[in-house]
């Protein structure tokens, strides 16, 4: 008996290294046998196995070839995705259920593409007769750059781009070519982050493309590829509608211009375009669909025409617009909430004229210094309607300034939440002001701080901080007069703020750490920056969407507040 047990143990020791049993994460009772060939890096599913399930396997090497038996009749979705180094699939010639062509796995009748090897790259044309692509068929592929859909296929395959709650990263296509038989298309099936162009045959009866952007022949923009890197896009004249999801998830776009004649913007058309700042809308626009601009967190510059119909949550989570679209009636004389801005002429020592009307040559209502705090109420053509606070005058005044003489600061702030202030190094008092807009020469009223004392920051308005001085007494203080602390600075992040002793001065962002470097923009005190590194007397910073260098002496580090 002992001898028999020893023989059995010896046999098991010899067999088990060749045959492995994989256990599925979602169904422990399902498994299949396989063998591994280290010489050829082949993984062979054993004859007799009928179902291939999605399993986790601890293999000694990554297979490059997967061999499937003739008995296999069913493959679960994602069952092959664990094999990320595979260059080809092979099926037994006598299989009644599957076949392979050039290493790609299909159903036996050739109607369905089941699995595409993760390591297969370049350009690929799906064979004629294929009408369906299984979900997950291209999952894990990092090399396919161009895909041609075949004649006879009538709709974009649901399994073409694999994603879960967002845009797809695989396969990394840059070019997709549709056949003339494709009828059913939509941006929701084209959410691939690398896709740069969608091409359509000239004889297509329903579709066409312009510079790789997909349109229907009824003049609807269907899909703007997510891989396009242009920051600005002018929708072509003659376009009548923006289709559902046409631009959603795009990360490069900062501005979009919509043409005269456009009537509708579809549901989720610009949803989650996280860096979109401005959209120019024509007077012909009649309706905006549900969640069309939802989660466009940097959108700050739009002017809607009168009586435009807004869908549910059309502008949900657009904090720089300051309203929730579900609170707006279907037809209104629309106005955005006030946007914080600073007077900003090209010559920073000039004054900005406040005009009585939004037109050149209009009467002047007065002027303000460069760096003066303003509120933008709405845009009328090339002018902003603004509200400003005049020292020594009760209430506020309204007027108009050219768009190019105003710098929006809502967008340039917001990296961190100002929380507490102390007197800047070497100072025992902080000038205090009664208004959020003060002239460069205004000295304010000194507010003496006990050494180590800090004050609560209520909010930031351009170059000024609203401070709680105690007992509900609020005042304003310039950012350049204080040491600033923020709340919950993310680990690994390093923030700062542009400061200057003169509110009219602006700091250059340069393309290299030298005064000889090209200026990428000029920024007032109060602008939030992310500090990425330092070189000598310069910080490498990110301001908005731009990266460059700023002189360290004019950037004050913002430290995280630690409760005392």
Image (spheres, rainbow, N blue to C red):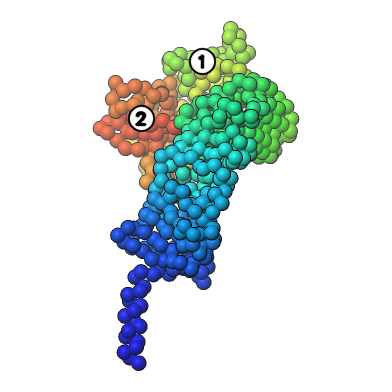
Residue at (51%, 18%) from the top-left corner? 404
**Horizontal and vertical percent for residue 339?**
57, 29
Give the residue at mark 1: 352
Residue at (46%, 45%) from the top-left corner? 170
Instruction: From this view, report whether residue 399 is shown above or below residue 130.
Output: above
Residue 192 shows in the view: yes
Residue 334 shows in the view: no
Instruction: From this view, report whether residue 256 is shown above or below residue 146.
Output: above
Q: Tell me the number on the disc at residue 138.
A: none
Which class describes the residues within 10 Å of circle 1: few (<14), some (14-19), or many (20+)?
A: many
Residue at far left of view = 536
462 left or right of 291? left
Instruction: From this view, report whether residue 257 is shown above or below residue 564.
Output: above
**Horizontal and vertical percent for residue 109?**
56, 51
Q: Secondary structure at mark 2?
A: strand
The mark tally for this picture is: 2
Residue at (56%, 29%) from the top-left corner? 201
Depth check: give the residue in front, 20 or 93.
93
Q: CA distance from mark 2 to mark 1?
A: 28 Å
272 left or right of 64? right
Depth check: give the residue in front, 496 or 218.
218
User: Which quadrant of the figure contains the N terminus?
Assistant: bottom left
Q: Earlier in the sequence, mark 2 or mark 1?
A: 1
Q: Mark 2 vs mark 1: give the one in front.
A: 2
Residue at far top of view = 361
Give the residue at mark 2: 548
Depth check: give the residue in front, 520 or 507.
520
**Horizontal and vertical percent for residue 433?**
49, 29
**Horizontal and vertical percent for residue 525?**
42, 28
Which class describes the residues within 10 Å of circle 2: few (<14), some (14-19), or many (20+)?
A: many
């Amino acid at each position: 008996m002992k001898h028999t047990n020893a023989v059995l143990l010896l046999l098991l020791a010899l067999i088990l290294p060749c045959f492995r049993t994989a256990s599925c994460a979602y169904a422990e009772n399902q498994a299949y046998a396989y063998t591994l060939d280290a010489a050829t890096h082949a993984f062979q599913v054993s004859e007799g196995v009928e179902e291939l399930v999605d399993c986790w396997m601890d293999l000694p090497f990554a297979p490059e070839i997967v061999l499937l038996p003739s008995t296999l009749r069913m493959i679960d979705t994602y069952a092959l995705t664990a094999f990320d180094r595979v260059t080809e699939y092979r099926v037994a010639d006598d299989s009644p259920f599957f076949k392979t062509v050039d290493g790609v796995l299909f159903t036996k009748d050739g109607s369905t593409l089941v699995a595409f090897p993760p390591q297969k790259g370049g350009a690929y044309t799906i064979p004629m007769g294929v009408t369906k692509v299984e979900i997950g068929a291209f999952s894990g592929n990092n090399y396919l750059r161009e895909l041609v859909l075949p004649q006879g296929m009538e709709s974009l395959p649901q399994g073409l781009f694999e994603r879960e709650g967002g845009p797809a990263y695989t396969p990394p296509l840059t070019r997709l070519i549709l056949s003339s038989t494709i009828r059913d298309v939509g941006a929701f099936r084209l959410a691939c982050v690398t896709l740069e162009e969608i091409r359509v045959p000239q004889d297509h009866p329903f579709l066409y493309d312009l510079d790789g952007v997909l349109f229907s022949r009824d003049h609807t923009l269907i899909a703007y590829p997510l891989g396009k890197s242009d920051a600005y896009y002018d929708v072509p004249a003659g376009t009548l509608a923006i289709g559902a999801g046409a631009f959603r998830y795009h990360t490069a776009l900062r501005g979009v211009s919509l043409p005269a004649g456009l009537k509708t913007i579809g549901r989720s058309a610009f949803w989650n375009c996280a860096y979109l700042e401005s959209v120019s809308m024509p007077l012909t626009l009649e309706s905006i669909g549900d969640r069309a601009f939802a989660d466009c967190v940097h959108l700050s510059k739009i002017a809607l025409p009168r009586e435009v119909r807004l869908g549910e949550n059309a502008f949900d989570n657009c904090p720089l617009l300051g309203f929730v679209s579900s609170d707006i009636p279907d037809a209104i004389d629309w106005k955005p909430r006030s946007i914080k801005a600073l007077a900003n002429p090209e010559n920073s020592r000039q004054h900005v004229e406040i005009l009585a009307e939004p037109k050149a040559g209009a009467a002047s209502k007065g002027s303000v210094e460069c760096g003066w705090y303003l509120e933008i109420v709405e845009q009328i053509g090339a002018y902003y309607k603004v509200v400003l606070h005049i020292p020594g005058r009760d209430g506020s005044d309204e007027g108009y300034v050219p768009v190019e003489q105003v710098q929006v600061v809502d967008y340039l702030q917001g990296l961190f939440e100002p929380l507490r202030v102390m007197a800047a190094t070497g100072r025992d008092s902080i000038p205090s002001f009664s208004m959020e807009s003060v002239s460069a020469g205004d000295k304010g009223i000194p507010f003496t701080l006990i050494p180590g004392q800090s004050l609560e920051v209520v909010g930031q308005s351009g170059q000024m901080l609203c401070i709680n001085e105690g007992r509900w007494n609020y005042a304003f203080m310039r950012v350049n007069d204080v040491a600033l602390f923020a709340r919950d600075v993310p680990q690994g992040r390093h923030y700062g703020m542009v400061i200057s002793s003169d509110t009219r001065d602006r700091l250059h962002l340069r393309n290299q750490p030298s005064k000889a470097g090209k200026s990428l923009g000029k920024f007032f005190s109060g602008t939030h920056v992310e500090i990425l590194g330092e070189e000598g007397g310069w910080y490498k910073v990110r301001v908005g969407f731009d990266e460059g260098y700023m002189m360290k002496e004019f950037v004050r580090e913002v430290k995280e507040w630690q409760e005392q």
